[in-house]
Image (cartoon, rainbow, N blue to C red):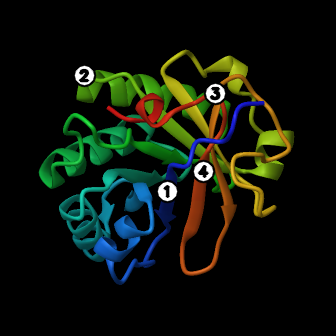
Amino acid sequence: MPEQDTERGVDLSLHQVVPDWPAARAHAVSFASITVTESLNWTDAGAARQLGAAQQAGIHTGIRHYARPGAVHDQAEHLVRTGRLLGAFAPGALAPTLDVEATGVDDRFIKSWIKAVRHASGFRRVLVYAGYEQWLHRLHPDKWADSEVVLWLVRHNGIPGRPGWFHSRLGLHQHSGGEYGVDALVYPFTLADVLL
């Protein structure tokens, strides 16, 4: 197997912060996903500030939406509207991410959300984020993951880019956590494969 790509990333759930984005960049963090929206109309103003600071530090930054069951199209439009206001969809930004960890968010929701985000935004690449147990038992990406969907697996095994689960569209691995998630690319994916 080729040597693992050295690109590192972080991802922030609600209310998490990176106190010093320039220091993160200096420590080889090259991409970040920040949860900014949830459900139909909630936006985290603190996360929006984190997004701006990460962008200023030169990190490929994107926004994440925490999905709740129901109103798929409204949730997709909320993410796109917020992302445009925050400048989160510029070329080179991390593709928008859908966090599907909430109970009741299923394959049908994901498929509809991807279609709605693509229609509302005009871009195709999206990331779908879930924990190991969900990928194993609840989600079926073969039903909705085309060549522009990248799966993001959360499994804190401490082995960057080697999560112990495989899918041809699996490109990102959150391998450790704490103040925020720490991520790596999964071979053969490169940074270009997860950016707009």
- Disc 1 or disc 2, which is closer to the eye? 1
> Do we see residue 38 in this rendering?
no
Q: CA distance from mark 4 to mark 3?
A: 12 Å
Query: Mark 4 is on which residue type?
Result: Ala
Residue highlighted by disc 4: 184
Q: Earlier in the sequence, mark 2 or mark 4?
A: 2
Q: Nearer the viewer, residue 88 or 53?
A: 53
Residue highlighted by disc 2: 122
Q: CA distance from mark 1 to mark 4?
A: 6 Å
Q: Earlier in the sequence, mark 3 or mark 2?
A: 2
Q: Are marks 1 and 2 in contact (CB under 8 Å)?
A: no
Instruction: Quadrant for the C terminus, please.
Output: top left
Residue drawn 22% across and 69% down?
53
Q: In the rendered image of this protein, does residue 145 appear above or below residue 73?
A: above
Q: Earlier in the sequence, mark 1 or mark 4?
A: 1
Query: Mark 2 is on which residue type?
Result: Gly
